[in-house]
Each structure stands twice: as C-alpha cells, then as structure tokens.
Amino acid sequence: MYKLYLKIAARYLFKNKLYSFINIFGLAIGVASFVLIILYVNHEQSYDTFEGSEHVQRVYMDYLEGGEYVPGDANAYIVTGPTLKEEFPEILDFVRLRQMNGVALMIGETVFDNNKGSLADPSYFEIFDRTLQKGDISKALNEPYSVILTPVLAKKLFGTEEPIGKTVKILDSESPLFTVTGILNENSRNSHIKNDFLVSFKSFYTWPSFEGDWEFTWNQNMYFTYVKLDPRTDVALLKQKIMDFKVEALPFERHNMEPLEDIHLTSDKPYEAETNGSAKRVGFLSAIALIIIVLSWLNYVNLSTAKSLERAKETGIRKVAGAQRPQLIVQSILESILLNVIAISIGLVIVVLLLPLFSTYIGKELTLQFSNIDTLFPMIGFVLLGALVSGIYPALVLSKYAPATALKGKVRTSKSGIAIRKGLIVGQFLATIILLAGTFIVTKQIRFLQNQPIGVELDQVVALSGQVLNTMPDSLFLNNLKAFKSELGRYPFVKTIAGARTYPGGGYDALNSSAGITFPDGRRDDKRITYNYGVDPTYFELMDMKFVAGRPFRENAQGTSNEVVMNEKFVRFMGISNMEDAVNKTVHFFNQDWVISGVIQDYHHFGLKTDIQPMLLRYESNGDNLLVKFDKTMASTAGLSLAISQIENKWKELFPQSTFTYTFLDQNFEAQYNEDKAFGSAFQIFTLLAILIASMGLFGLTSYTVVQRKKEIGVRKVNGATITQVLALLNKDFVKWVLLAFVMAVPISWYAMGKWLEGFAYQTTMSWWIFALAGITALGIALLTVSWQSFKAAVANPVDALRDE
Amino acid sequence: MLVELNNIFKWVQQGGQRIFLLKDINLKVEEGEFISIMGPSGSGKSTLLNVMGMLDTFDEGEYDFLDEPVHKLKEKHRANLYKQYIGFVFQAYHLIDELTVYENLEMPLLYKKISGSERKSLVADMLDRFNIVGKKDLFPTQLSGGQQQLVGVARALIGKPKLILADEPTGNLNSKQGEDIMKLFQKLNNEGVTIIQVTHSEKNAEYGKRIINLLDGRMV
C-alpha cells in the first residue's frame, strides 16, 4: 500500500512539473539558507566550548567611570591570578597569557614574520583542555625558555624535520634561544584567543626584551587571566566576592569575571585578544533563518492546499472505493514527506556547493564535517518536523471533501480555508517587508558609517611598521630613523612623514590609558579612564587635524617634550568650555606635568561604533608606525606599489636586520566595519532568497486561483469587461494583502532595527521612506508575479473558458 | 430485501424556503433486480442514487440496507457497508489519472485490506473477464471512452458487490460503446448482480426490468 502511495506521489510530481519545481525548489532554498545560517550560528556559539569549559572564567578589570564601574580592560594584572587563587578556595587554578602579536621568529638568520604567541603558565593545558602531539605535557611549559608550537607553525619553521629540541629566537636577534619542548595537537576548536606558539611564563622573569616590565606588582596589567573553578562553586556568589575584593593599590578598579564560553559572543571590552563576535548579530541571523524556513513551509502549505482542489476528484474516487479519512491523510502526509526529502537533499547539495563561497563572504571558516554529521541531525530533525507539520493541514483539507461533491467537481475552498490562505499570504508579505526594510536600514547604516566624515584624512596614508631585529641603542635607532625619514622626504611622491604609536582605526592596542589626572584648576579626576598616544609634531598636518586653539608641538632634537595636544572632548571633560582657555595650561598624569600646546577638533579614533573619547596626544618621536602621506598625483595603484617597494629598499638599507610591513590607513579604518558589512551582505542575500521563495509561492498560487476563476473571467469578458478591468479585479486582493502586511511590518521592523542600531554610537536615521520603499518593493514584486498569470487569464478567449460547462 | 426506502425527504434551505430535492420517496429493491431511474434534468435522479449509495445524506425518512438501518449508522459503519456491498459506475468514469489500469482496479482492494497475492489474482481475473489484459499498463488518458468505462465497471465489480449503482454510465459514450456497456450490465444482472442505473435514454432504460420515473424529486 505504501509503495503504491509513493508511486502515485512520484507520478504526480512528474506530471505537474511547474508545481513540483516551485514546491521543491522553494523548500530546497529555504532548507539551504536555514542550514547555512545555522552552521554560522553554531560556529559562533562553538567558541571555547570543551570538556570542562563551563567551569572556566576569565578575570577582567572594571574601571570606575563617572562613579560607576564599567568593563575597562579584558586583561588583568600579573598578580591577579596568584592573589585570587590564594584568597578564594573555589578557584582551583589559574593561567595567565600575555599576548605578543606580529612577532618575528628566527632560526639562524632566517626570519619568520608576523606570528602570534603568548607567555603561558603550565596550567594552560589543564584549563584549556589541550594536549600535546609531541613532547611531555607535564614539563613542556615548566622551564624558562621553553616554547611549544602549533603543528602548522612547526611545519613552517622546520619543514619535515623533527622540531622537538630545536631552538628558535623570539622577537629579536639578541633573544635567548628557546627550545621547542612540545607540539600541540591539532584542534578544530574555535577560541577567542588564538596562538601559534606558547612560551613558558617563567621565561618572562629573565627575558631581556621584557626588562621594562620586571615589576611583579599591581602595575602590570597585560595578562589575560583564566581561572578554573571548583564545579560546586556558586558562580554568582564568587563573582560578587571577587567584585568586592579590595586591592589597595587599585582604588579605581575592581576585578570581575565572566564565563569563558560567553566571551566570543558577549564581550566587547577594551584590549580584547581579537574583535569578538556579536550575540545580537547571531540573534538576528537566527531570526532570519527561522523566517526563511517558515516562509518556505507557508509556501508549501499554501500551494498544496490550492492544489488539493485539483485532487478533490481523486479523493472522491478513493472514498467511493472505500478509503477512509485516516488512510487519505496518511497518503497525503507521505507525499509531503517524499517531496520534503527530495527538497532537503537538494538543499543539502546546495549547502555543500555554496559553503566555500558563503565562508569567504562572511569571513568565517565554516565547514560541514561528515565526521561529526551528528551536529546536523538536530537541524534536519527540525526541518523534517516542519515538513510533517506543514503536510498536515493540506492533508486534512484534502481528506475532508465529501465524495459526492468532490466527484461533481464542485469543490470550492471553504470560507475558513480562504481565510487561512489569506493569512498565509499576508504572513509571507509581512516577512518579506520586514526583511526588505531590515536590508535597507543595514545598507543605509553601513553607507553612513563609510561616508561620515571622521575628522581626519586617511586617504593616501600608509603606516610602515618595520621591526628592527637586532637590538641597537635607542639613540642609534632614533638617528637611523631620522636618516630614514629625511631620505623619504626626498622622494617626490612623499608629501608628509610622521611617526606615531598608533593612528585612527588602530584600536586600543597601542593606546596608553591613565586613570587619575589633575586638571589645570587643580581638581583631580579619578572617575574616568583617558587614552593617550605619542606622535611626531608633523602628525597633525599629515592627518589634516584642525586646531581650534593653540598649535602643534614645537619640534626639538630629543624628539620628545612635555607638550601635549588634546581634543575638544578632553577640554570639555576638564570643565573648560572655551578652547582658547586650555592652551598653555598644565595637566598632571603619569607622574609628571604636561603643557597643553593646542586643541584639535574631535575626530573618530575608534570608528563610529564608539562615541568620541577624550584623547590626548603626546610629543614622542618613535618608529612604531611611520606614517607616510603620498602625493595625490601618485594615486594609481601601480605608482603606489612602486613607491612602497622603493621605500622598503631604503628601509632595508638602513636596518638590514628587520621586517617591513605596511598598512593603508583608510582600508584599515574601514576594516573595523568588516563584521557589519558581512552581516549586511548576509542580510541582503537571505532577503533576496526569501523574496525569491515568496514570489515563487505567489506565482504558483495565482496560477491556481486564476484557473478557479476562469469561468468568472469568461463571463465578465463576454459581458464587456476589458483586459484592464479583469487585471484590476484579479490584482486588487493582493494589493489589499500587501497593505495589511505593511501596516503590521512597520512597527516590527522599526523595533527590531532600532535594537540593531543601538550597537552603533552614530546611527543613520530610520527615515519613513525606507519603510515606504520596502512596502512598494514588496507590492511591486507581488504585482509583477501575479500579473504574469492574471494577464494570461485576462487575454484568454472567453469562449474557451465557458466551453467546459 | 436489499434496499428499502421509506418516506425519504431531502431538501436545501434557500432564501428562507425549503427546496425539495427528494420528496417522500418509497422504494423497495430486491436482490437481482435491474432498475432504471429516469426523469428530466434536476428531477433528483442522481441525488437518489447518491443517497442509496450512502454518498449523500437525507433529512427525513428511513433507509434500510440489507435490513441495517442506514439512517442510524455512524459514518464509519456506513462506509464499511458500502465498501463491502456497493460498486459505483460514473458518467465521467472517474479513474485516477496517475494510476495505470491495473492499479486503478487494485485500488479498492487496498482499502479492503486484501493480501497482495489475492489482489493480484482478483485483478488478473477481472482483466481477463473484460478482455483488457493488454491494456493493464496503460494510463486512463491513453484509453478510449468506452475502454475507460469498461475499466470503471471492472473496478466497481472487483470487490464482488451485491449492488451496482451507475450514474448515466453511457452519457459520455457514443451509441455503439453505450450499447456494449448496456449489454455488459445485462449480462452481469443475469449473473445475479443487482443494478440500479440513472439514464436519460429510453433505449437504455429498456434494459432495466423496472423503470422509475422522477419529477421534481417525486416518484411518478
């Protein structure tokens, strides 16, 4: 019997090609979109989950700001771990990681640039549940000058040679030799803190490169600190105790902690190890995934129900032949399962084909591993459950028809049936309009971010950040640097040069922060962290920063002085409203007096996601970043790369043992919005797919309603209705439904997108025309889809329509 | 007694008025009879047939089928009754387009939970008897009207019913095909099957042993 059911279902699908195509393809797209998004969501949620990860917390610092504690630093102090472990028995162990980014590794004379590593306590393996593929895990990080590598880095450094026992220099050529004591096991696990190599923490105490930091007190706050808790711990209580724990040396800070598993999605503190994900984005995408799959189910329900009218005769015959309702329901559901299984299979094929493209598009390494296919089961289960549920309504409708009427072909959709179908269509339009409005707002916001003046000119500016590997005395280095600068100045394509610790778009990493600053009027503020960085006097001209009062630093031979320049926000923060009044006043921080030489207009240092912060620039010539502004006439890409290679040659000439990297500042600044752009792209793609699904459904549906109204249309035309009037008659309903959906969609998308915009300090306006445009687009798509069918019906010869009777 | 209708009324409400489809029908049908129901369009012939076939309900009166009071039976029980004892033949044949001739014949047996091997032999018998073995793998649309109706009759007979209800079985056929079907009915009746047919044609009605005339829902 079931074989027959399947056979008839298969024949039916083949016979009604358009219907089958629309139904299967719509579902397949729905399934594919859903699976792709869920893979992304799973990826984002998989960060730092492993055996025991639920008992690991990260300790970070809250800063007092305006009388309240706010998350101030993702790092904690070097003594935080040991102190807290001593103080709280709930803490079983801790691990400190001090990150080193863009590190050069040297084997003999060969330099391997741009590696990422950390100093790490031996407890790392236990707390992060990592194992070694080679080497003794109980000793690997115990001795000073031990280093362990990832397999990838080991391969890069040593090729096929046995890495264990080999030595490597880290940071510079004067570095002590580090012995490779272990190779980490490969793991596909995601983590918010990524390392290519780990150096035993004990190396730190004698490693000359860190000499300036050999102060093991509440002064060294560059240590990501993770603690492993006793599983029986009341976490909320311990968190409170840690917050209440007073450290005398830190009057304006307190410790706090957060679950390791939550860091990637919820933490966005200054000095994070990397730009984290966003729970909000994940939430939005999950909602879109759900909307799309529900949309395709609605489609399916709608189409099959409409189609069931056509199959009423079959139902009638079966009933007359003795079929009972449950049997007919089973048959119908079986058919829908068959159709869904085909659709899901096609959908999964689409996923496999599109995954690489989708991964690049959203900038995440997503994989569909068949080794752990079980992660897919919940998804497929969910999709199949939906298939079953969406199969039930058409089955009920189909099996309900009374045989006598069904056989006469007099079956009409019932009133409640029509209401349900209208509801489904309105639901589809609702989803479409919400997604459209969402896409428009996301696109508008991203464009706003890109076009908003940021108060500095980053065009044609390159930051050179070479690293000198042989230690040379500072004076010699500065001399060479000066020579390099003057050499550069001779190139016709170089307009301005300036050294700087960091630059707009450089994030928090190279910024100094200070809490506790004494204002010119003698008041001391302890309520707020302020940031500062060191630059050359030419920096302001290069960046096209406008002085509202005063002047840049006065250049001197030492390349540093006690002059500072601050932004307007800083001046207002000090309670001075007239910018001129701040000039030549003295502020006190970092244990010394600083003279304000000028005030610059506010500019965006962090991008438009964050408010403008009070910012202070110190005179401090340095080679961390050498900013070079090119002449406008050099705008061509070929010209630029030629110019850069000339600069690189010059650099290598002056600093033979060094690395050389460069960054375009405008691109770097834009990169802050990469995640948002990826989100916008994903939003656009899936909105497009949702619209495709919805309009395919609409197309299929109208082809049936038009058939049903064929006689009516014929009669009207015989009685003198024009094609336009018939079109209007057929399209009128859809206009009504779109309007209804529009009215419901506006508040929903207003609210949802408002929530999304909250993540930006600077927001575009949600103009009325965005919603109007979304509504009109939806209406246009609906009318286009519907009219194709309506037009065919309207121009048909009425005699054909009436002959059947 | 196969069928006994006593004072059967059926009506629809239209604009506050009762429009009678069937009015005080009294009819007794013995096993082995061949009855033709005649009357103009809208006189209630098909309605009467549907009521007898339990495809349609009535509003008043009593209906006994093989001494079972149909008007008191539950839907499920009623379905079992007609599934077992009644076969239908339609003007428009009503074969399932997606099924082959063989599968169309097999379908009613599926709903009677008859085993696979028995189904096979029953269908084979029927194909043989109606001389359509060669057509068993064709789909209905590949057959002529007469052949389709032949399959329709074969399907009605396959469950070995006591009663065949035929609603204008020759209505869509030409005169030669129609005559073939009528002769088939006569033969079946001679073999003991009770037949009730609705027809417009005087000539076809003559095949019946008894003719019932309907006018505006009443027997005349």
Image: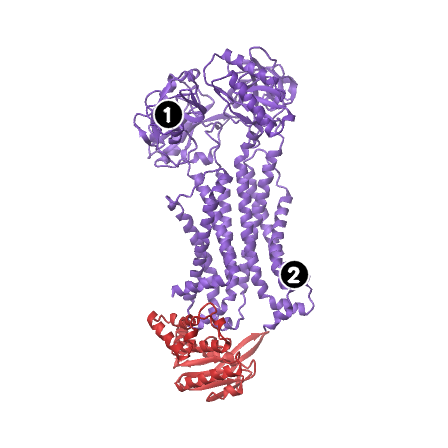
Q: Position of residue A643 (x, y in %)?
A: 58, 24
Q: Give whichever of A408, A195 is nearer the camera.
A: A195
Query: Do pointers 2 and 1 mark residues of a single chain?
Result: yes
Q: Position of residue A589 (x, y in %)?
A: 52, 16
Q: Give whichever of A384, A431 is nearer the camera.
A: A384
The residue tagged 2 is A727
Q: Is residue A101 above or below residue B95?
A: above
Q: Position of residue A644 (x, y in %)?
A: 56, 24
Q: Position of residue A439 (x, y in %)?
A: 57, 43
Q: Is residue A796 above or below residue A773?
A: below
Give the letter of the purple chain.
Answer: A
Give the letter of the red chain.
Answer: B
**On the rendered image, what quadrant is the N terminus of chain B found in?**
bottom left
Query: How was the colour assigned to the protein in this rendering?
Result: by chain
Residue visible at 51% across and 55% down in the picture:
A298
Q: Is residue A235 left or right of residue A298?
A: left
Image mark 1: chain: A
Residue type pointed to by label 1: Leu
Residue at disc 1, secondary structure: helix
The residue tagged 1 is A84
Tell me how far mark 2 sits from mark 1, CA to CA.
76 Å
Marked residue nearer the N-terminal end (2 or 1): 1
Quadrant of the rendered image containing residue A670: top right
Callout 2: 10 Å neighbours few (<14), some, many (20+)?
A: many
Residue at disc 2, secondary structure: helix
Callout 1: 10 Å neighbours few (<14), some, many (20+)?
A: some
Q: Is residue A783 above or below residue A262?
A: below
Quadrant of the rendered image containing residue A494: top right
Image mark 2: chain: A
Residue type pointed to by label 2: Leu
